[in-house]
Image (cartoon, rainbow, N blue to C red):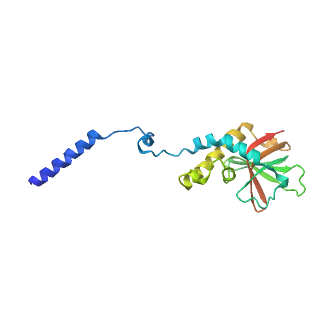
Amino acid sequence: MKKNIIWILCVVVLIVFLALNAKVIDKGTEGQYTGVVAFDASSSSSDDWSGILAEITANAEDIKDVDLRNLGAGKAVKLTGTVSEFVSKANGKKNSITVIPNNSTSGEVISIQLGSVYTGTSVRDIQTVKAFGDFTNQTEWSQYAKAINSQIHELVVEPLNIDESIQGKTVTVIGAATSSGDEVTVTPVSITIE
């Protein structure tokens, strides 16, 4: 019986000791104590946006000079052409325009993503401001791609208020082109409507 009482007293003393020496920290400040800071994709992409825009703009090749069947993970392109159609899918969340490039001899039509939902990670994949090795894991790398696509929507597409009235107008687009079968899709980093 005495042993049990001694053990109970020891446990109580230990609990009191730990309680008196414990430090309560505010949520979100854990990194100051552990050195581990939570990843913030939005902040990271915001910080990188001007560099990504400058790099893709500088590297963009005229789409008529690009082999559209061999785009790999993506290629920086520039095109000017006439909008042939405004397409709205998924209750207006997957909008796009189809553009017939000027001086097109093969009659290809290019699809330009307008969001708000963007398919793929082509802009992230062709930029070199950040690489996979700059992130802790694949999840952060994926979150970074989504955050870049959100930047595109917020800074490039949304301010233009594009709707059906764009049909027949001339646009100049700079962005990341990918292909699937015969379809070429560009995720824009810049759109100018003339």
Choose between 57 and 186: the one closer to the eye: 57
Query: Which corner quadrant of the image does residue 3 belong to?
Result: bottom left
Choose between 86 and 110: the one closer to the eye: 110
Which residue occupies 41% across, 42% down? Answer: 33
Which residue occupies 13% across, 53% down? Answer: 4
Is residue 75 found left or right of 19 in the rendered image? Answer: right
Q: Is residue 124 above or below residue 71?
A: above
Is residue 35 found left or right of 53 in the rendered image? Answer: left
Which residue occupies 75% across, 42% down? Answer: 190
Q: Is residue 66 above or below residue 40?
A: below
Residue 161 percent across, percent down from the top left:
74, 38
Position of the N terminus, as image quadrant, is: bottom left
Q: Is residue 21 above or below residue 72?
A: above
Is residue 87 visible in this depiction of the protein? no
Position of the C terminus, as image quadrant, is: top right
Is residue 7 visible in this depiction of the protein? yes
Q: Residue furthest bottom?
A: 181
Residue 67 percent across, percent down from the top left:
81, 59
Residue 142 percent across, percent down from the top left:
59, 52
Number of marks: 0
Is residue 43 found left or right of 22 in the rendered image? Answer: right
Residue 43 percent across, percent down from the top left:
58, 41
Choose between 68 and 157: the one closer to the eye: 68
